[in-house]
Image (spheres, rainbow, N blue to C red):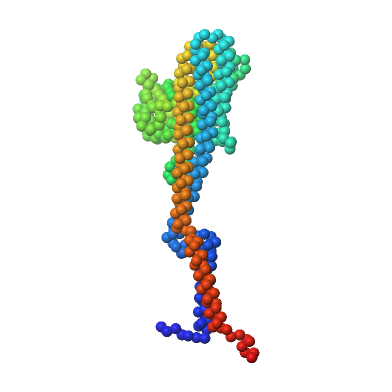
Amino acid sequence: MPTRISSQYNNNQTQTNLRRQEIRKAKIDNQIGTGSRIANLRDDPLAAGHVVKYSSYAARLNNFEKNAQVLTDQFSYREGYLKNSLEVMQRVRELAVTGAHGVYNRDDMRNMAVEVDQLLGELLQNANAITPEGNSLFAGTNTNIRAFDVELGAVPGSSVPIVASVHYNGSIDQNKIEVDEGKFVTVDNVGTRTFWAENQRLFGGRDASNWQAQQDGIVAIDGQKIFVDTGDNIYTLVSKINSSGIAVKASVDPIKHALNLSTTDAHQLWIEDVSGTSMYDLGIIKDSTQKPPYNLGDSVRVSGGSLFDAVITLRDAMYAGDQETIGGRCLMTLDSGINNLVTHLAKSGSQYERLENDMIRNSATALNVKQQQSREGDVDITKALTDEKMLEYTQQATLNTAGKMYNSTLLNYMR
């Protein structure tokens, strides 16, 4: 179709081309100013999609690196307190070996008991340690409370009230912190695992041979839920506990026909009826108003205690001059507790090393992502500057041409 040429055609075309050149120049100027060649999604939809994904992944990598850094700081604090606790326990063991020789009199034993009591205080200080932010290091997820409470009492041989028992206030929940895409580090800050000495055993005192669950219920052992169905008997419950994967083994006492529970590593048992009354009916725990871990039934016998229990037993035996207890049960319990501390110290150290490697890898990955993001979205400065100069020349040439086309002025009519 032929184009109609009017008197305004040349002017309109010139103005249109000038506007187009200005738009193109403004776009290039914006790219040079921002360093990005994509101002709108329509500029390059495919590259824009890639840039969005790279930016999101880079942000996640940054968060992973921050998480790992916070955890390494926490593990560093915790490792320091664990090392000091290990040194304390080794000194306590030295005193136990010394007291078990049988060559020291009662006054010497009392003097050693005083030192053991001071070491107990230092151990409690480590167990109640807090981070610079004021969070408790060994209270599980209850970081805003004191991990262990102390109960003072009169002990034969001491003229003043001293530590008679220690109770845990924290939780047994463990945080899972993401340090890589879909990869988590479990932070075990549970004080009744770190500062425990022996495998704990519970011996029920109620005959369970005729027990049957009257309703569906849920039993929680160490935080692991075990579902009890209506009609389950004691052997069914034992089987469910043993197949649950938790570090606890259940059995039926061959004489009393009561439920017995024992841990397979050094920690304190936490038992509760989440729904139903199975453990209460079996006499293992008190009613649901009592919270674990100090909710065991009155008929339940317990063996296996914490590091604090071990040190308290040693101190009291020294005050009493009981060398047989010192050289027997005390030494055995202390050795078990020291082994547990070493295990947790090794675990903390290995997690620290893993986090250091994670930070190095995430830093390298973030650099690669930045390069990919730059390749897709950054402007080529050399090309952009060249294009800008070409547009300036084109625009100047257009203006010169338009000036020659419309060189008539009012002065031409005043001759």
Q: Is residue 296 at least partly visible in the picture?
A: no
Residue 166 found in image quarter: top right
The residue furthest bottom is: 415
Image quadrant where one finds the N terminus: bottom left
Residue 264 found in image quarter: top left
- From what the image shows, is residue 326 above or below residue 182? above
Q: Is residue 158 left or right of residue 272?
A: right
How many marks can you see?
Answer: 0
- From what the image shows, is residue 101 above or below residue 63? above
Viewer-side residue, 178 vs 273: 178
Give the residue at x 38% y 33%: 244
Give the residue at x 41% y 25%: 262
Give the residue at x 51% y 14%: 98
Query: Residue 331: x percent and y percent?
Result: 47, 17
- From what the image shows, is residue 275 above or below residue 314? below
Viewer-side residue, 249 vs 396: 396
Image quadrant where one finds the C terminus: bottom right
Query: Residue 271: x percent and y percent?
Result: 45, 30
Query: Residue 70: x percent and y percent?
Result: 52, 40
Viewer-side residue, 91 vs 233: 91
Q: Is residue 393 at least partly visible in the picture?
A: yes
Viewer-side residue, 342 vs 387: 387
Q: Is residue 111 left or right of residue 262?
A: right
Query: Residue 160: x percent and y percent?
Result: 62, 17
- From what the image shows, is residue 262 above or below residue 353? above
Give the residue at x 55% y 77%: 399
